[in-house]
Amino acid sequence: MITLQNEHSLTSHDKTVSFVCKPAESQPSALLNLLQQDFKGAENHSTQTMSQDDKQFVDMLTQGIRQREDAHYSMLLPFKARPKLPNNRGMAEKRLRLLKSKLQKDSRYKNDYFEFMNKIIAANDAEIAPPVECENGGRWYMPYFGIYHPKKGKIRVVFDCAAKYKDTSLNDHLLQGPDFINVAASRVVCL
């Protein structure tokens, strides 16, 4: 589960994303390499060809990754600028009620959904978020839902950062980061 938590030792962007990652090495550079493995062919992507936003994104990741005492990693959310998000709890609760209704109506969906969530919790890829006091009352609740792969028939849970509330979403305030997919695709030569 992605959570926001205070880390007073960090810079002006004092909110972090907590997540679990188990690379062979326990250095932030090893984590960056792990994150880039999904984009084979993009590793030679020079920072000279990146936009200013992309460079800011890479700098935030490079400087903001911290290994916690429990060996998990914590990194800054890559905000364009620290936003004042509205409290979207009502919207998130409505989405949760819709999810609950779907789980009650569709036993296959419910079984697959619970199996998926239990697996990521058992693998320590998700954890229950501790209660957090937010400065200035800023809170953003992330709705989620399950979706089946059209060909494989397997479910995955989507944490919906694009969910809109009062004309804004979490994604609206985050840097996108370098487009490694298009860089890798541009190196494909068609004959």
Image (cartoon, grey):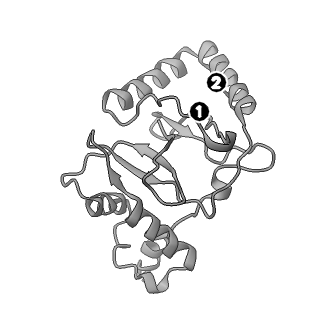
Tell me which amino acid carries mark 2: Leu
Q: Is tag 1's residue or tag 2's residue first in the polypeptide sequence?
A: 2
Distance (Cα) linking label 1 and label 2 = 7 Å
Above or below, 168 relative to 117: below
Residue 129 placement (x, y as % from top left): 47, 31
Above or below, 10 relative to 130: below
Above or below, 32 relative to 142: below
Residue 84 placement (x, y as % from top left): 71, 51
Quarter-wise, where is residue 160 in the image? Answer: top right
Residue 80 placement (x, y as % from top left): 61, 64
User: Along the line of sight, which residue is nearer the eye, 122 or 28?
Assistant: 28
Residue ID for mark 2 = 99
Residue ID for mark 1 = 145
The reply, left or right, for residue 130 in relation to residue 93 is left
Residue 73: numbered disc: none
Tell me which amino acid carries mark 1: Phe
